[in-house]
Amino acid sequence: MYFKKSLKSILLTSLCCLPLLASAADKKQQPNVLFIAVDDLRPLIGAYGNEQIKTPNIDALANQGTLFTNAYSQYPVCGPSRMSLLTGLRPETNGIMNLKDKIRNVNPDVVTLPQLYRQNGFETAAVGKIFDPRNVSGRKNDDPQSWSIPYKAPTSFMKGKQKLAVESLEGPIEKFVDGNINKHSIKLLKKMAASDKPFFLGVGYKRPHLPFTAPKQFFDMYDPASFTLESFQTAPANSNAKYILNNNGEMRSYKPTPKPGEKIKPYPKGPFSEAHQRELIHGYYAAVTFVDYLVGNLISELEATGEADNTIIVLWGDHGFHLGDHGMWGKHTTMEQANHVPLIIKVPGQKATIYKKPVGLMDIYPTLAELNKLPAPYELQGDSLVPAMTGQKESKQPVAISQYKRVGAYGYSMRTEKYRYTEWLSKTKKVVYRDLYDMEKDPGETINVINDEKYKDVVDNLAALLRANGKGLQRLK
C-alpha cells in the first residue's frame, strides 16, 4: 500500500538526523504529560465564551495555560481524527480514514505519540478512549506498543435504556463509565507520580459522545426552556447539500425519551421538533458538565501528588458536533461545527495566553515533542505550537485543514483567520464542488459566496494557499 511505502521513506530520510536520546539524568528532569481527551466535545465551554454551560474546572485550566480559540480536527470522525493527532500525520498518510482499518496493519512502522515517550524512558499508560479501539488491537488491549503499563478497558455499571439519545440516571459517579475511567486514572496517576520516571498518562472520557447519559445532578443544573436553538437550520444558500450536509444517521440510530406510558419510538422523519432539540441540547450540556467535574477531580489529584508544577496538561476534543445548525445533529461534515474543537495546553512556568489563529490537532505531536525535547521519529506533518504559546514570530500564514469523504469525493476544507474554503476532488483529482464562507461576516455559514465576483481574488488566493499547505493531501497533488 502507499501508506507503508510513504512512512518507510519518511523514516529512512529522517532517522539519520535524529539527535541523541536524553541521558537517564535528563529524563528525571523531564516534565510529565497529562493528556486528556474528550469525545465529541465542541468548544461549548465557558472559557470559549458560552455563558450557559457550567465548566468551572476546564475554565480554570484555560486560565492557567494557552487557550487555542480556533483549533480544528483533521477528520470529523473519532478514529481518523485521533490517529492523525497520535501519529502527527494526515489520515491519507498514516492510512486511517475509516473505523475498521488497524494502524499496525496499514502502517507497521508508525510511531505514536505515547510510543515516542515510551521509547525515551517515560512510563506510559492510558485509561478510557485515547485511540479509537476499532483502529488498534481492540477494546481489551488497545495499542500495546504505546503503553509501558498494559492497557485496561474501563467498565460501566450504570446503563440506561437501549438506544435512548438522552438519559438522566441516579447512581454513584464511579458506576458511570466516565466515573470509572476517572477512578482508574487517579489510581494510575498516584502510582506513576511516585515513580522516579517521568510519565505520560492518557485519560479519555467518552462523553459527551452519544448517548447523552449522565448523573441526574448534572441534568438538574439546567433548564431546557432556557436554551437558545440554532437560528439557521437549513442548507446554506448557493450550496450543494449532498457534499456538505450529513443525514443525521448517527443521531437517528438513537431514540427520543418517550412520555410516561408511551413506547420508545424512533425520531419522526423530517426536522427535529423543538422539544426534541431542547432535550438533545440538555443531554449534551449535562454530559459536558459531568466531564468537567471529572476533569476537576483529576487535576486536584495531580496537585495532591506534588507533580502539578512538573506536568504539562493537554486537553482536547477529537472533533466538533452539530447541535442543530443547518438542521444537523452530529459530526461527519467539512463545516465549522463538526471540526472546531477545544484545545488547552498548560506548561509549567509558562504565562497564560489566548491564541486566536487557526491550528490543527495534528500540531499537538510536534508541540509535545519540542516541549519534552524528544526526537521526532519521522517528518511530522503538523507544526509545533510552541511559537504560538510563547509569542514568537510565525514563519508562515497559520491555517487548519480538515477533510472528509462523501459521494466518491474528498473534501479538503481550509480554515484561515477570515474564511473557510473547501474543495471536493474526485478520484481523478477533478474539482467537482467548492464552497467559501466569509467567517467574519457570516460565522454561521449561511451563504456560499464561491461564485460571488467580489470574492474572485480571495478564491484564487485560497486555492493556492490550500495547495501550499497540502502536504499529505493526496488528491491535491
Image: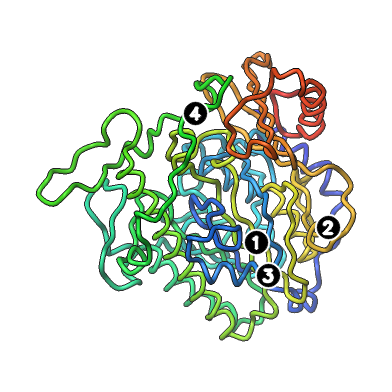
Tell which of 463 and 364 is nearer to you.
Answer: 463
Mark in front: 3 vs 2 = 2
* Labels 1 & 4 near each other (Cβ < 8 A): no
Task: Residue under label 2, please give it.
Answer: 387
Sequence-first tag of 3 and 2: 3
**Mark pair 3, 4: CA separation:** 38 Å
Sequence-first tag of 2 and 1: 1
247 horizontally vs 96: left or right: left
Going by the numbered disc 4, the residue's amino acid type is Leu
**Mark pair 2, 4: CA separation:** 36 Å
Q: Quadrant of the N terminus?
A: top right
477 horizontally vs 256: left or right: right
Task: Residue under label 4, please give it.
Answer: 245
Mark in front: 2 vs 4 = 4
Q: Is residue 136 above or below residue 67?
A: above
Residue 312: give its label.
3
Residue found 34% across the figure and 61% down from its top: 214
Going by the numbered disc 2, the residue's amino acid type is Pro
Q: Position of residue 430 (x, y in %)?
A: 68, 14
What is the secondary structure assignment of the residue under circle 4? Answer: loop
Mark in front: 3 vs 4 = 4
**Mark pair 1, 4: CA separation:** 29 Å
Residue found 38% across the figure and 68% down from its top: 180
Q: Residues within 10 Å of mark 2 (few under 14, many from 20)?
A: few
What is the secondary structure assignment of the residue under circle 3? Answer: strand
* Labels 2 & 4 near each other (Cβ < 8 A): no
